Image (spheres, rainbow, N blue to C red):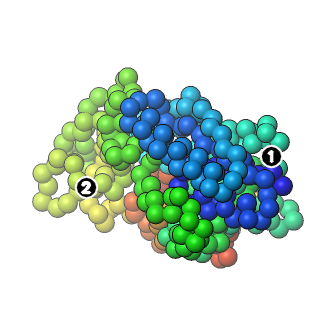
Amino acid sequence: MKIAVAMSGGVDSAVTAALLKEEGHEIIGITARFLPYNDINDQIYKANVNDAKAIAEKLGFKHIEVDLVDDFYQNVISPFCNEYLRGKTPNPCIICNRYMKFGKLLDIAKNMNCHLIATGHYAIKKNNNERFYISASPDVKRDQSYFLYMISQEQLRYTIFPIGSYSKNEIREIAIQKNIPVKNKPDSQEICFIPDNDYISFIEKNTSNLPPQGQIVDISGKIIGHHNGIYRYTIGQRRGMGISSPVPLYVKEIDPEKNRIIASTKEELNVFGLETANAFDMKMIISGKIKAKIKCRSTQSPFYGTIERHNDRFLVQFDEPQSGISPGQSAVFYDEGNDVLGGGVIEKTF
């Protein structure tokens, strides 16, 4: 079978390719250039693509490069900046998976007559004779199922995750056993296009019309301070508020229409539910009311709630109050078997 492997130059995609090659498949490694052209990004890309080429040479398969810089800016970077300017906290990796890795890259793989595309995600692909769906990796710390809930049925049909049932330690061991060139390469941690994790500076450099300063108010509406732009704040934030108060205050809400931050005590941060801006189904078409486990961040321990569909949105009622949930994040639903049921981008909490 002819399989395209999305290759970042890291150990996960390297072992993905090695396992498939060992099974006798014809492999084509694809490394995509996503990041805008500048000296730092050029150095990062050159190092990664050289690693990918070394892996391909070692394992004996073809490797190609593709330029998706403009597509990445349009589909990922620009929406990322715009969402922060709207007072949201977006997750660009989810968008990148849907539109880039399993969108543009999959199209490229199909155009090369590949039967499948494989990635080094820690997630398990399953099917129930009706639908394809994602299940969480047994390596809880590495599980990436949260980032894949937007993948369509058509995209999943042509996608495989060969290392999904492995732990990271096992992948490292395989890389060492096979003497893969990147066996000791460290994992990337930050958002790929913000290597220093300074998203505020990134937004300021990539946005022409930044929002002005505005008010910080308490939950009664009393003005207690001023902010330097709502994009600088996230729900639950305490540091950098610049407010003198006898009790610690946190960002409870960001109001882009009034360009203001609402601050509260920690106890007042709790919310009891959320509404999504859209609705994505995976294991099942969610209808009526269902009970499920919910994650609003990839590293969050799941909590229980009731999900009800309202056309193209989900209304979610939590069993217990939750804090630190931000509009712009995604709410992803799981069943007791840790299969992804669906999810949506959070529009508001209540």
Q: Position of residue 220 (x, y in %)?
A: 27, 50
| Residue 198 versus residue 292 in the image, above or below | above
Q: Is 73 left or right of 165, judged from the image as shown?
A: left
Give the residue drawn at x 79%, y 37%: 111
Q: Residue at x 56, y 65 (%)?
A: 179
Secondary structure at badge 2 equals loop
Three-letter code for the amino acid on which mark 1 is drawn = Cys
Helix, strand, or loop for circle 1?
Answer: loop
Q: Compare marks 2 and 1 and give the one earlier in the sequence.
A: 1
* Three-letter amino acid code at the position of disc 2: Arg
Residue furthest right in the image = 129
Say which residue label 2 marks: 238
Q: How many marks?
A: 2
The residue that mark 1 highlights is 114
Of the two numbered discs 2 and 1 in the rendering, the one whose residue sits closer to the viewer: 1
Alpha carbon separation for disc pair 2 and 1:
50 Å
